[in-house]
Image (cartoon, rainbow, N blue to C red):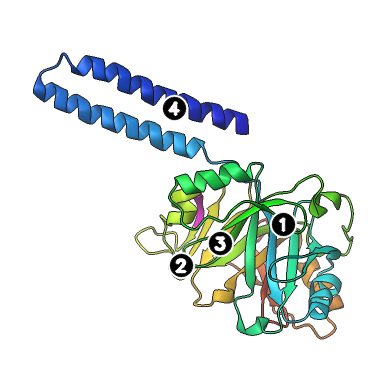
Amino acid sequence: MVSIINFKSRIFTRHSSLVTRHLSLVIRHLSPVTCHLSLIACHLLLSLCTLTAQEAGRPPVWGIAKMTFLVSDMDMARDYYGRFLGFDEAFSYPSPLGMVVSFKVSDRQFLEFIVDKDARSKKRLVSISFETDAVDRMRDYLIAQKVRDVGKTTIDGAGNEVFTVDDNWGNTVEFIRFNDNGLHKLSKGKFLSENRISKRIHHAGLYSEKIDEQDPFWVGALKCRELVRYPEDKTQAPVILYLGMGNSTENIELYTPNDPNFGHPCFAVDDMQDTVYTLKERAQGQRLSAPSIGRGKRWLLNLSNPDNTKVEFTELHTVK
């Protein structure tokens, strides 16, 4: 896939240079008026080539790799995400914010936590990470798209190639390549508890102070495409917007609840009733909300950990 995209990008660039060369030869023999019109047409054609090359140049994004949160206490995190939700603690590694403890959702998705005793009074979503095969090319691509303050590519404490950038509302977005010798890849086939409440993060909710259907970062730079919006009437401004990354079915949900701690994982479940009953059996004092039918006519369940960080569950089919 990457080689095909590179090939297309080179083709567009080559064609634009050929267009320039041939039109310059033709224009020399035209009248002034015809020459002016030809120059306009040439400019439009070159712009089209450039736009197409930019879209073709974005490296693939293969889904949500992990979400990282602050927690006030790691024992609380182990009880909530480990015992209650059933995810295995897999490994830990150092980071600039402190030790990261990783819980495994699947071989390609993780929930990670960093202790901060003041977490309850802070924005608790540290970052959302997307997997890509080409970290350096993604970084170069975003810089070419005029995205500001793109971080340098580094090797993180788990041995993976990463860089970060913030969206327009202060959500830190990490692009990651899971290296073969990194802790995440080395855990393949391990720490996959039969007790885990879900095997996949379906989407990630992200705080957005204002929803822009032409969001300069998600739509303009990353070329995300609208999947669902509410209200569906496009004469009204959206209050919820789901955007797809193009290479995977996982997506992001932009929402404006006036709460910077809206950031959360939404887990896919096969049967909401089974999920509710399983969590009821494990509760041991954990507060359970009632399931509800969302705007997309699917069963939803919204919970919060003791730090008030949201966790959501959704059935993948509509209500029958």
Camera-nearest residue between 8 and 145: 145
The residue that disc 3 covers is: 253
Q: Residue at x 37, y 23 (%)?
A: 17
Q: CA distance from mark 3 to mark 1?
A: 27 Å
Q: Amino acid at mark 3?
A: Glu
**Is residue 92 covered in magenta?**
no
Numbered circle sitting on residue 156: 1
Q: Earlier in the sequence, mark 3 or mark 2?
A: 2
Q: Earlier in the sequence, mark 2 or mark 1?
A: 1
What segment is highlighted magenta in the picture? 224-228
Q: Nearer the viewer, mark 2 or mark 4?
A: 4
| Magenta span main SS | strand
Left-right relation of 43 to 80: left
Q: Amino acid at mark 1?
A: Asp
Q: Earlier in the sequence, mark 3 or mark 1?
A: 1
Q: Residues within 10 Å of mark 4 (few under 14, many from 20)?
A: many
Q: Secondary structure at mark 3?
A: strand
Q: CA distance from mark 2 to mark 4?
A: 38 Å
Q: Secondary structure at mark 4?
A: helix
Camera-nearest residue between 298 and 169: 169
Numbered circle sitting on residue 239: 2
Numbered circle sitting on residue 238: none
Q: Amino acid at mark 4?
A: Phe
Q: Secondary structure at mark 1?
A: loop
The correct choice, above or below, for 47 with respect to 220 in the image is above
Q: Earlier in the sequence, mark 1 or mark 4?
A: 4
